[in-house]
Image (cartoon, rainbow, N blue to C red):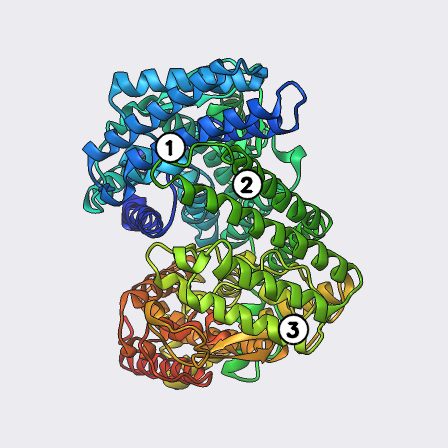
């Protein structure tokens, strides 16, 4: 039976699809490594340097030390820091050199040793947590020297990135929810589809035991998961080599296993990777039983696919905000295998949730549950599905017939229900997140500047009485005093901003943010000079804040005074976090808020594709009616056009439901919003590296209501294009799930490839216009080289290609012979 199942999977190109998807997943992760991602090992919540800073702050507030002792301690510590900067010589280090990686490690270890001796010299009492950090650093040092591995903590990870660390770092993506969703989509047909097309009846004549038939289907899914895992490992190592990553003895790096009692345990990298894959196979065994059970009870395999995948996504979204769901007995939570093995979940740079568990015990519970679901599935295996229903609906035209095929398909109603639930849950996550941040952010903001101010004051005081004959020390001391002034100013600004926000004084509030923008960009943090943000981000942020102040728009909570430019992504080493900076969920702002926080573009296009696209698959799946229809005197070109039009109109209905839901949710929670809130629109492409200060000619501001209308229009034209493309694909493909998969896969692949084309010609491709938000704000031209941009260009290109695919499809079906 297993051989027969493997043969069917081979005929459906399942293994090829898995290989392609594995390559795409690994490839996209390596792109992020090249651009900005920090690939580190989080062995401690705080580095030794962080702990020393904490201890300094404690000394500043402690009565146990005299002022002279505090100054002496800080003076010695500042000397260690200066020696470290001198020894490490960043300018002459090759990030790709294994020799230089070891050199950096040795310099850091020497600095750590000096800092530990400093603590002993001043007889500083350490807390139990401090002692654990120091004890761990000693273990880590000994293992790095024993295995000859470089440093792996975040600050220095760029010198030691290796393929094994990348595999482990991204294990939540490689061996987590993504592959489970992929396998669910690929295999939910495994029983329900056989029932739909009647081939399940053939199994009734087979003398094989029902349980053996079910187990052979489960074995196929598990085998596919093992092949997928092998593809991931192979592609990761190959792409790592092609991207110039050295090995760095990465298989011998150590990972700390966290426990609530603080025991210092660790696991070697290659053992951790093998455990991750092993537990992934166990979880795959459990989810394969869920897939088979869902398929066995589903009357329609699209319903089963939609419900299961939506449920997995919804649980994952809720889990990140509901602590009670973060339990190893939650199978979605259990897919975060690395963190379950290591005993912690990381939420931010310094915020950890420790979990007290034995992973083996919980994973074997899921293994046992898988047999329960398999046993239950066999009772549904031979249930005959009689889905034929007589409809007395009068069909007046070909268009009515095609529209009815989509709307009467059960997957359409399931898609509507699932999309409504999904959008509502995403909104609730945004709503709760915004309210929490509004409550705590101002206090955190003040605390951040207060701590920074205290630290720089402490460092400045520490160097007042230090001998200034040492080379460069006087300049070093002046830098401390300058930073004190900077953070004092930022702290004062934060106080003014909080007062203006509470008084709903928009002009004063945005004036404060504008002043903070200038201080942090040029005078204080010198963010522009360091390359952290580009000149484009500064110019756009300045113009937005000036407009908000001028129009006295009601103050909205702003996390930072920077509104990141879409041109930031052109910088290979730029900070790429384009998450939204404004905590608002009014009706007008909610679509943008969702788009900047979650991939709303992908969600909407994915939902509508599952609901409306299918083309000729609706005929082919139902007894291959298309061949019968072609024997009738029907105008095939007209028939094809009606298919495209019906998919388009059904897609518009789904889009309308989503936008009406967003409008209602925004009105209920925050109101309609200010229609004049400014959004940046890009009118021409620029060279971001050579942008001159004060140059604002490449963008302009548009009100958010215009942005929302453009967003809606962009979705409409995109749906039209996808309807024509899917109808074209369905001429050659039989099953709807494959039509949707090929349509979205081709669109995603070519959309990515178009980003690599640095020529204005890419604008002529429809795949360059598939991000609705990019069309709405004009950022579709970023990197294209176009001297001018107009919003109507994108709808024009999409409409032209819609007509092209429709005409080509019409020509093919007209010439297609009836077999």
Q: Which mark is residue 548?
A: 3
Across and down, in percent, residue 37 comes to: 38, 46
Q: Which mark is residue 216?
A: 1
Q: Residue at x 45, y 62 (%)?
A: 622
Helix, strand or loop at label 1? It is helix
Describe residue 653's horizontal placement relative to residue 26 as left or right: right
Query: Which tag, 2 or 1, sits closer to the chain's start?
Result: 1
Across and down, in percent, residue 559 comes to: 61, 56
Report if the CB atoms under discs 3 and 2 are less than 8 Å apart: no
Q: Residue at x 47, y 66 (%)?
A: 537
Image: 180 above or below 135:
below
For disc 1, the neighbor class at 10 Å (few under 14, some 14 to 19, many from 20) is some
Q: Farthest residue toward the right?
A: 503
Query: Where's the C terminus, which quadrant?
Result: bottom left
Quadrant of the rendered structure where residue 600 is?
bottom right
Q: Which mark is residue 456?
A: 2
Give the alpha-carbon distance from disc 2 to disc 1, as whole Å: 66 Å
Asked whether 308 or 59 is in front, the reply is 59
Describe residue 620's horizontal placement relative to residue 387 as left or right: left
Give the alpha-carbon distance from disc 1 to disc 3, as whole Å: 64 Å
Image: 375 above or below 609:
above
Across and down, in percent, residue 742 comes to: 36, 61
């Amino acid at each position: 039976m297993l051989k027969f199942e493997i043969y069917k999977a081979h005929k459906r190109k399942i293994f090829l699809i898995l290989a392609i998807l594995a390559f795409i997943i690994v490839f996209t992760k390596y792109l992020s490594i090249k651009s900005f991602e920090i690939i580190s090992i989080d062995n401690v919540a705080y580095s030794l340097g962080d702990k020393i800073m904490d201890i300094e702050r404690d000394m500043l507030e402690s009565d146990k030390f005299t002022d002279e002792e505090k100054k002496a301690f800080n003076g010695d510590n500042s000397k260690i820091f200066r020696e470290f900067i001198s020894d490490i010589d960043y300018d002459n280090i090759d990030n790709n050199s294994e020799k230089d990686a070891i050199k950096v490690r040795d310099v850091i270890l020497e600095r750590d040793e000096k800092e530990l001796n400093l603590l002993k010299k001043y007889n500083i009492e350490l807390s139990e947590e401090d002692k654990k950090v120091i004890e761990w650093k000693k273990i880590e040092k000994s293992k790095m020297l024993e295995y000859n591995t470089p440093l792996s903590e975040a600050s220095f990870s760029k010198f030691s990135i290796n393929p094994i660390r990348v595999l482990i770092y991204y294990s939540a993506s490689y061996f987590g929810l993504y592959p489970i969703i992929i396998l669910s989509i690929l295999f939910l047909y495994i029983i329900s589809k056989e029932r739909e097309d009647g081939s399940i009846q053939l199994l009734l004549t087979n003398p094989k035991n029902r349980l053996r038939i079910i187990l052979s289907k489960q074995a196929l899914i598990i085998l596919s998961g093992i092949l997928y895992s092998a593809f991931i490992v192979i592609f990761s190592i190959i792409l790592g080599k092609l991207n110039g990553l050295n090995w760095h003895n990465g298989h011998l790096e150590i990972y700390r296993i966290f426990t609530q009692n603080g025991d210092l345990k660790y696991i070697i990298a290659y053992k951790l990777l093998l455990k991750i894959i092993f537990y992934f196979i166990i979880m795959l065994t459990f989810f394969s039983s869920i897939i088979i059970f869902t398929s066995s009870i589903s009357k329609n395999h699209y319903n089963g696919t939609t419900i299961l995948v939506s449920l997995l996504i919804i649980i994952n979204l809720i889990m990140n905000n509901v602590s009670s769901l973060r339990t190893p007995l939650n199978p979605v939570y259990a897919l975060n295998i690395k963190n379950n093995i290591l005993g912690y979940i990381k939420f931010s740079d310094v915020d950890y949730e420790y979990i007290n568990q034995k992973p083996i015990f919980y994973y074997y519970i899921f293994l046992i549950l898988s047999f329960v679901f398999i046993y239950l599935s066999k009772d549904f295996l031979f249930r005959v599905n009689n889905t034929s229903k007589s409809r007395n609906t009068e069909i007046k035209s070909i268009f009515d017939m095609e529209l009815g095929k989509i709307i009467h398909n059960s997957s359409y109603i399931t898609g509507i229900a699932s999309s409504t639930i999904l959008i509502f849950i995403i909104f609730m996550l945004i709503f709760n997140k915004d309210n929490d941040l509004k409550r705590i952010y101002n206090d955190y903001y003040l605390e951040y500047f207060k701590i920074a101010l205290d630290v720089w004051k402490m460092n400045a005081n520490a160097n007042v009485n230090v001998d200034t004959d040492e080379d460069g020390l006087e300049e070093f001391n002046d830098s401390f005093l300058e930073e004190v002034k900077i953070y004092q100013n930022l702290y004062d600004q934060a106080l003014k901003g909080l007062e203006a926000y509470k008084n709903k004084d928009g002009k004063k509030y945005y004036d404060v943010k504008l002043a903070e923008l200038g201080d942090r960009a040029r005078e204080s943090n010198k963010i522009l000079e360091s390359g952290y943000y580009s000149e484009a981000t500064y110019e756009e942020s300045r113009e937005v804040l000036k407009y908000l102040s001028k129009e006295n728009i009601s103050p909205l909570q702003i996390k930072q005074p920077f509104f990141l430019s879409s041109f930031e992504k052109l910088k290979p080493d730029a900070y790429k976090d384009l998450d939204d900076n404004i905590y608002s969920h009014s009706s007008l702002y909610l679509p943008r808020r969702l788009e900047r926080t979650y991939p709303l573009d992908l969600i909407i296009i994915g939902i509508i594709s599952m609901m409306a696209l299918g083309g000729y698959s609706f005929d082919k799946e139902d007894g291959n009616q298309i061949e019968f229809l072609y024997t009738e005197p029907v105008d095939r070109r007209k028939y094809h056009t009606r298919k495209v039009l019906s998919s388009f109109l059904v897609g518009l209905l789904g889009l309308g439901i989503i936008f009406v839901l967003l409008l209602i949710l925004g009105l209920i929670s925050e109101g309609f919003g200010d229609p004049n809130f400014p959004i940046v629109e890009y009118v021409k492409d620029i060279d971001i590296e050579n942008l001159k200060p004060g140059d604002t000619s490449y963008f302009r501001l548009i009100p958010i209501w215009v942005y929302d209308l453009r967003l809606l229009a962009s979705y409409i034209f995109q749906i039209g294009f996808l309807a024509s493309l899917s109808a074209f694909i369905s001429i050659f493909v039989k099953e709807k799930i494959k039509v949707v998969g090929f349509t979205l896969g081709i669109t995603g692949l070519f959309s990515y490839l178009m980003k690599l084309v640095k020529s204005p010609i890419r604008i002529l491709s429809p795949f360059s216009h598939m991000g609705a938000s990019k069309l709405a704000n004009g950022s579709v031209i970023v990197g294209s080289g176009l001297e001018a941009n107009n919003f109507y260009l994108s709808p024009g290109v999409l409409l032209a290609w819609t007509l092209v695919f429709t005409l080509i499809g019409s020509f093919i079906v007209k010439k297609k012979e009836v077999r």
